[in-house]
Amino acid sequence: MDPAAGAVTQVATLPQPVDHVALAPLGSRLLLVGGGSKQVLSIDPATGATRAVANLPQALSDPAAVAQHGKVIVLGGGTSAVYSLG
């Protein structure tokens, strides 16, 4: 988004619609988790490429995700587990 111009640009297309997800940066990519899915998606905003990169042990909905020290930490989403990705 360009706040000065009020312009929004689509940077990728996901394989299916999602909701109740978390998104966190990992290097030049974004990791998307949750949405009632086990799948972890990697999004490259520079190229628009989207691909599955991992599966969590269980599906998550409404998780939290934060980038820290080159990893993405995921928690919540209907579980007491804390996962480290990356």
Image: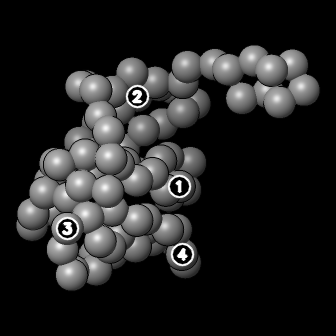
Amino acid type of the residue tagged 1 in the rendering: Pro
Few, some or many residues within 10 Å of mark 1 (<14, 14–19, 20+) = some
- Would you identify the image quadrant in which residue 58 lies? bottom left
Q: Distance between the residues labelled 2 and 3?
A: 29 Å
Few, some or many residues within 10 Å of mark 3 (<14, 14–19, 20+) = some
Q: How far apart are marks 2 and 1 (CA)?
A: 15 Å
Q: Mark 3 points at which residue?
A: 78
Measuring from the top left, give residue 46's x and y in whole percent: 57, 30
Q: Residue furthest left?
A: 57
Mark 2 or 3: the one toward you: 3
Q: Nearer the viewer, residue 44 or 37?
A: 37
Measuring from the top left, give residue 61's x and y in whole percent: 24, 55
The residue sitting at 13% across, 57% down in the picture is: 59
The residue sitting at 21% across, 81% down in the picture is: 80
Q: How far apart are marks 1 and 3 (CA)?
A: 22 Å
Amino acid type of the residue tagged 4 in the rendering: Gln
The disc, 4 or 1, on the residue closer to the chain's N-terminal end is 1
- Would you identify the image quadrant in which residue 73 lies? bottom left
- Would you identify the image quadrant in which residue 64 lies? bottom left
Describe the element under mark 3 as helix, strand or loop: loop
Q: Which of 26 and 19 is in front in this view?
A: 19
Q: Looking at the picture, does residue 44 appear above or below residue 58? A: above
The disc, 1 or 3, on the residue closer to the chain's N-terminal end is 1
Describe the element under mark 4 as helix, strand or loop: strand
Describe the element under mark 1 as helix, strand or loop: strand
Mark 2 or 1: the one toward you: 1
Q: Which mark is residue 49?
A: 2
Q: Looking at the picture, does residue 48 appear above or below residue 22? A: above
Mark 3 or 4: the one toward you: 3
Q: Nearer the viewer, residue 46 or 25?
A: 25
The reply to whether dot 1 and dot 3 touch (C-beta < 8 Å) is no
